Amino acid sequence: MGRQVINQIECAKCHKLFDVATEDIEWNHLNDAGETEDDSTIHDFNVFQTVECPYCGRENKVVMHAIGKSAAEFDSIKVIPLEID
């Protein structure tokens, strides 16, 4: 299986868009934030980390946010940048 892109983010330094993939996520830091307000069988998950811009090398702070029934079964997943320059 190839690289699975989650979504693109913009580098806070050079402002170029780059892909963030599942292999870039530090899964050992996955946090179960608990049940969602709408459905007690669905949980929020997150990972706070940095990802390096492939163009300028800057470390960008991001949060990976996922919603699903378990850490192995996500309904949605998104990487959100936490800083702007």
Image (cartoon, rainbow, N blue to C red):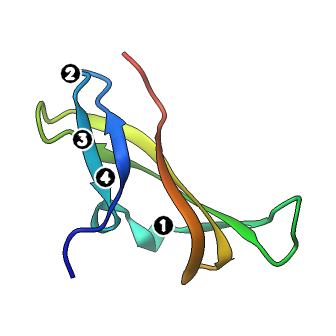
Are dots 2 and 3 in contact, CB under 8 Å?
Answer: no
Verify CB contact (< 8 Å) between mark 4 and mark 3. yes
Which quadrant of the structure image shows residue 32?
Answer: bottom right
Q: Nearer the viewer, mark 1 or mark 3?
A: 3
Q: Which mark is residue 18?
A: 3
Q: CA distance from mark 1 to mark 3?
A: 22 Å
Q: Position of residue 19 (x, y in %)?
A: 27, 48
Task: For mark 2, give the secondary structure.
Answer: loop
Q: Left of 17 or right of it: where is 84?
A: right
Image position, residue 14 (x, y; %): 20, 21
Q: CA distance from mark 4 to mark 2?
A: 16 Å
The disc, 1 or 2, on the residue closer to the chain's N-terminal end is: 2
Labels 1 and 4 touching (C-beta < 8 A)? no
The alpha-carbon separation of the residues under discs 1 and 4 comes to 17 Å
Packing grade of label 3 (10 A; few <14, some 14-19, many >=20) is some
- Mark 1 = which residue? 29
Q: Amino acid at mark 3?
A: Phe
Q: Secondary structure at mark 3?
A: strand
> Which residue is labeled 4 in the image?
20
**What is the crowding at mark 2: few (fewer than 14 residues within 10 Å), some, or many (at least 20)?**
few
Any mark on residue 14, and which? 2
